[in-house]
Image (tube, rainbow, N blue to C red):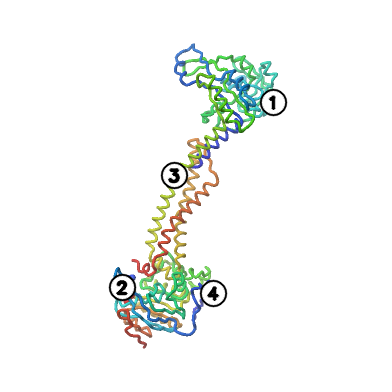
Amino acid sequence: MLAIGEGASFKAQEIIKTLGSQNILLRSQKPGEEEKVTNRRDNYVLEYGLKNEDLKRIRNTIPGVETALPARVVRDYVWNITVRVDVDVVGTLPEYPIVRNHPIAMGRFFNQADLDAAESVCVLGKEMAQKLFPLDEPLGRDVRIGDNYYRVIGVMELRTTGSFSEGNLEDAGSASRDRMFIPLETARHRYGEVLFRRRAGSSELERVALHEITVKVVNPQDVIPVADAIKDVLEKNHKKKDYAVVVPLELLKKAEETKKIFNLVLGSIAAISLLVGGIGIMNIMLANVTERTREIGIRRALGARRQDITTQFVIEAVILSASGGLLGVLLGVLIPFAVSHFAGMRTIITPGSPILAFTISGLIGVVFGLYPALRAATMDPVEALRHE
Amino acid sequence: MSTPLNLAAGTPSSAVSPVSAIGPIVGLENLRKTYQMGGTTVTALSGLSLEIQAGEYVAIMGPSGCGKSTLLNLLGCLDRPSGGRYFLGGQDVSGLDDDALSAIRGARLGFVFQSYNLIQQLSVVENIEVPLFYQNCPEEQARQIATDLARRVGLETRLDHKPFELSGGQQQRVAIARALANDPLVILADEATGNLDSASGREILGIFDDLRRQGKTLIMVTHDVEVGERARRIIRLRDGELESDTCH
Ligand SMILES: Nc1ncnc2c1ncn2[C@@H]1O[C@H](COP(=O)(O)OP(=O)(O)O)[C@@H](O)[C@H]1O
Ligand SMILES: [Mg+2]
């Protein structure tokens, strides 16, 4: 049970690792209420999202911002002769690998000169590189998107985050698309400002200047205030909420809070079950003591002190509850396993929790076994021998 | 054959004083026992004085309700007198607390009950070991002593049997072996033959005769005249008082 909570905060830590705790991610998103209107009208161009002005404002007016890295993200097919891969084509600046902490596996990332000249060069993601060029070196080869060819100059390192998709933070379960990088200027020329999108039978046009801006903060402590300042600025300049602000640090805090609440609820459930279990053990032991009254009398007559009788029955209670605890620990290891396997939820079993569970069940035996044991020990030997 | 018991390994409780070589093994001075029944006081024993020497074989007899069981419980340190004094092996045990009485029972006394009182889930040899367990006797030594005693009562082939697999006479023999395990000063028997057929009863009485010959001190409660006749000395009680004390 604790394993689910542990898994949730682990996911947030993974997001932090990908985006960096010093970063804030701004994304364009289609305002919700607009969708219904545009679905029926073919020639309407929907304009939304982050503007170049937003980028300028963030760069120039908000203190504590080290870099603000713009990116245009377009979903498209990339070809190598007959091999096709569905990717996110990302038009961005040369700083991307540094800001996003995403190193290059081979070759190089594009530089300022490539950007200025709007060169047709690209850097492939590791996965797509393997799909497009399963047999040979991708470097120096050309790939095709639509009618345009791009020279491969580098390949990125594989992202270690399996389940987490950068483009879709809230919906981490969706399949993540690999990213292919081209200079921002090249992307502007090739794709223009208006994008054509076909969905569910009807087509739509949309104009989005920038799909995402990654803001790197100078001081890690300032992430939250800077994020608040950015939110303020964007709110003033956008009529609609056509953007999203993702602060990894906030996500982590939220996840930690969720985990805390989760643990609290689970803790209460556990406490109640322990109480119920403890009372069960007490009942069993009381019945046991009554049933064995004669035996207690015999043992007392043969020299057992009260303390010896107490010890005997407490040990029996502990054995009883600890064997229950062992069963519980087994289930507690198997259930998170099943949850991960069938529900796809991430669960982590900290090595402490089975040990804790086992120890607690033993302690329950001591606590709830003590009263029956004391009842056994304080019996009058003569009475006990006469029993039945 | 003398008992090969040496409990030196077990730590004798400080409550148990060394046995005095002189004087009686049991000495009662004006021993009284009363029970509080709601508002009324029932007197079970009203001032009993007597002495029993080491090696004596004594039967306590009398009609039902005369106080035989009460006396045996007091002699067995299972209960405390309301008044008077009880010396066991020269030590005054009438004022001791529960833990001290437990220690005395474990080190100085052996019990044989009418209904055998074996622990059902333990085997023959384990039942005989119980008193040794509470004397902190090392495991191998306890097993050795218990096996020897089982042989003495003729149960060496039944060591691992459970009580319910044995006849009444056999169970009572296990109980006698258990009473001997801690080499007690006094063996107390309460109607030890009461639940047995006459053949098994004679067998048990035969073992008691053997014990007396070995110098053991035996006190047994019985209402059976024939059984009482086996003892050298008969103490008769009536209404909580000594009626007669005869030797033959
Ligand atoms: N626990 C007790 N509470 C009250 N009265 C008792 C108790 N035990 C014995 N007595 C009374 O003490 C007297 C002696 O009893 P007991 O020693 O059992 O006699 P016996 O064993 O000779 O039949 C009886 O009158 C009996 O009712
Ligand atoms: Mg009686």
> What residue does disc 3 label?
A269
Task: State how far apart marks 1 and 2 are (Cα).
Answer: 106 Å
Disc 1 beta carbon < 8 A from ligand 1? Answer: no
In depth, the one of B91 and B122 nearer the eye is B91
User: What secondary structure is found at the residue carrying circle 1?
Assistant: strand
For this view, does B24 lie left or right of residue A86? left
In depth, the one of B150 and B77 nearer the eye is B77
Q: Residue A271: where, in percent of width, then height?
A: 45, 47
Task: State how far apart marks 4 and 2 are (Cα).
Answer: 45 Å
Q: Between tags 4 and 1, which lies in front?
A: 4
Task: State how far apart marks 3 and 2 are (Cα).
Answer: 54 Å
Q: Chain of mark 1?
A: A
Q: Which mark is residue B8?
A: 4
Amino acid marked by disc 2: Thr
Amino acid marked by disc 1: Gly
Q: Between tags 1 and 3, which lies in front?
A: 3
Up the image or down, B109 lies above or below A163; here it is below
